[in-house]
Image: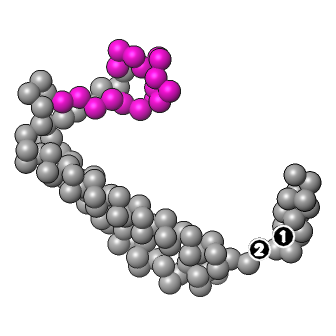
Amino acid sequence: MTPKPRADIHMNLPALRKLDSMLIETLDSMVNTEFWYSEVGPRAEESRRWWLPSPKVPKPGLSSLVRKNLLEKGNVVYQSFKAAKSINEEVLLEMAVPTISQSETQNRKNNY
């Protein structure tokens, strides 16, 4: 017996695989960059996001070519995010909600 994806998810798998390959390609292209990341910054303990590494750039800043390249990659990642979010919303809207969940939601809504 082999696992079989649900029909609603199965029709979106090619698009999700394409988005995945685009993101992996973007990550793989991020070598020999003019910027780097520092694991611990001077204000790491004060920061709300202390676990994230902080980006570092050389004193003169990034070259225009690198800036343009980063903006293009950022757009690719953002478009991938929007497409994945759209697929997720579509799948969630098509899913049937059990009647017990509907009645429970209605009860909680009436209590507030």
How crowded is the residue under tag 1: few (<14 C-alpha within 10 Å), some, or many (20+)?
Answer: few
Q: Label 2 sits on what residue type? A: Val
Which residue carries the number 2 mark? 97
Q: Going by the image, does 38 lie left or right of 32?
A: right
Where in the figure is residue 71, as x and y percent of width and height? Answer: 21, 52
Residue 43 drawn in magenta: yes
Where in the figure is residue 44, as x and y percent of width and height? Answer: 42, 19
For this rendering, which residue is in front, 55 or 17? 55
Asked whether the residues under the numbered discs 2 and 1 touch, taking CB atoms below 8 Å apart as contact, a structural biologist would say yes
Relative vertical location of residue 33 with respect to residue 90 in this rendering, above or below = above
Q: Label 1 sits on what residue type? A: Gln
For this rendering, which residue is in front, 19 or 3? 19
Where in the figure is residue 49, as x and y percent of width and height? Answer: 47, 30
Q: Going by the image, does 87 lie left or right of 92?
A: left
Disc 1 is placed on an element classified as helix
For this rendering, which residue is in front, 87 or 25? 87
Q: In which quadrant is the N terminus drawn?
A: bottom right
Q: Which residue does the image show at 59% across and 75% down from the upper left?
A: 91
Magenta-tinted stretch: 41-57
Q: Which residue does the image show at 85% across and 59% down from the upper left?
A: 109
Where in the figure is residue 37, as x and y percent of width and height? Answer: 28, 31
| C-alpha separation, residue under disc 2 versus residue under disc 1 | 7 Å
Which residue carries the number 1 mark? 102
Q: Which residue does the image show at 41% across and 61% down from the upper left?
A: 81
Q: Going by the image, does 83 lie left or right of 23?
A: right
Q: Is residue 77 visible?
A: yes
